[in-house]
Image (tube, grey):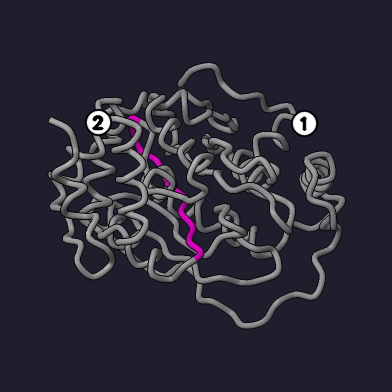
Amino acid sequence: MGIAHYIKEIGRGARGAKPLAREQAADLFGQVLDGQVTDLEIGAFCLAMRVKGETTPEMAGFLDATHARLARLPASERPVVVLPSYNGARKLPVLTPLLALLLAREGLPVLVHGHATEPSRVPASDVLALLGVAPLAAPRRIACGEVAVLPTARLHAGLARLLDVRRVVGLRNAGHSVVKLMQPVDGPAVVVGSYTHPAFATVMAELFELLDMTALLSRGLEGEVVSDPRRTPQLDGFVRGAHRVLQAQAPGTLAEVPGLPAAIDAASTADYTRRVLAGELPVPPAIGAQVAAILQLSTTHA
C-alpha cells in the first residue's frame, strides 16, 4: 500500500500539516519497520515529522507498531529497569553505567539498550564493556542484580535501520523518540525516560499516562537518562499511568562533583564508576535520588 498518502498529510509544513490518528500512525510506522517502503519514502517521512513534530496520538501509534514487533525480553522476578542509552558523552562523562550498576547493586534487573548513531560521542556500552558487561547476543531473561546490555538491532532490526537514517540526513527522527519510550520487556518494567526540551516532556508524560506505563521522567544528562550530577531535577513518577511528583526541582548548580573526571573517554569514566561503587568517592546526590525513586517505583509496581 505504501505510505505516500500519509506523507501527503504530514508533509505540508509546520502550519499546513495534519496530524495522523493513532491507528494511521501505527500503520505507517509498521510499514517502515517492516521494510515495506522505499528509502525515499523513509527520508520523506523522517523529514516531514521533523518539521511537523509528533503529537501524542502519533507517538502512541508509533509505539503500538513497535511493541507489536519487538523481540521482547522475558519477565524477571522483579520489575526490570529499562535504561535507554542513545546519546553518550559529549561534554560530560556518560554516567548511565553508574546508574545501572547502582540499581543492580540494589537487587534490580537492569536492561541498557542502545544504538550508536553519533561516532563523535562515547557510548555507555563502551564504558560497560570495560566494567565487564558485554552486549547480549539475543534477548533473554535478566537476573535480579544483573545489568544486561542489548543493542537495538537485537530488539528489532528495522528500528535500528531507522535510527541509522541519521547518519545520512544528519537529523534525529521519530525512531529516536520511540526508543526512549518503548517497553521491551514481556512483564513488569520501570522505563526511565528523559528529555531535553520541555515540550517533549509533556508528550512523554501524556504517553506514560495513556499507555498505563510505570516510568520515571526527568531532565537527563546530554540526552542520557541519568541525572546531571551537578543539579537536582524534578523527578516525575508514573505507576501504571498514575502520575505523582517524587522530587521537586531545586535551584542551583554544584561547582564541583568530587572525583568526576574532566575527560569523557570510556577508560576515565569506567575508573570513576569503579571508585564510586567501591565507596572511594561519594555517589552524586542527584543520581542517588534517582536510584531511590526507581526503587520506590519498582516496589510499588511489583
Majority secondary structure of magenta residues: strand
Within the magenta stretch, is there residue 190? yes
Which residue sits at x=82%, y=57%? 260
3D distance between C-alphas at marks 1 and 2: 34 Å
Which residue sits at x=17%, y=46%? 6
Q: Residues within 10 Å of mark 1 (few under 14, many from 20)?
A: some
Q: Position of residue 176 (x, y in %)?
A: 44, 46
Q: Quadrant of the C terminus?
A: top left
The amino acid type found where label 1 is placed reads: Leu
The amino acid type found where label 2 is placed reads: Ala
> Which label was assigned to residue 130?
1
Residue sitting at the far top: 137
Q: Position of residue 184 (x, y in %)?
A: 38, 34
Which residue sits at x=84%, y=45%? 268
Instruction: Identify whether 223 is placed above or below 65.
Output: below
CB within 8 Å, label 1 to label 2: no
Instruction: Identify whether 216 is placed above or below 15.
Output: above
* Residue interval drawn in magenta: 186-196
Q: Which residue is mark 2?
A: 68
Residue placed most toward the observer, 250 or 108 = 250
The answer to which image quadrant residue 67 occupies is: top left
Instruction: Identify whether 297 is placed above or below 168.
Output: below
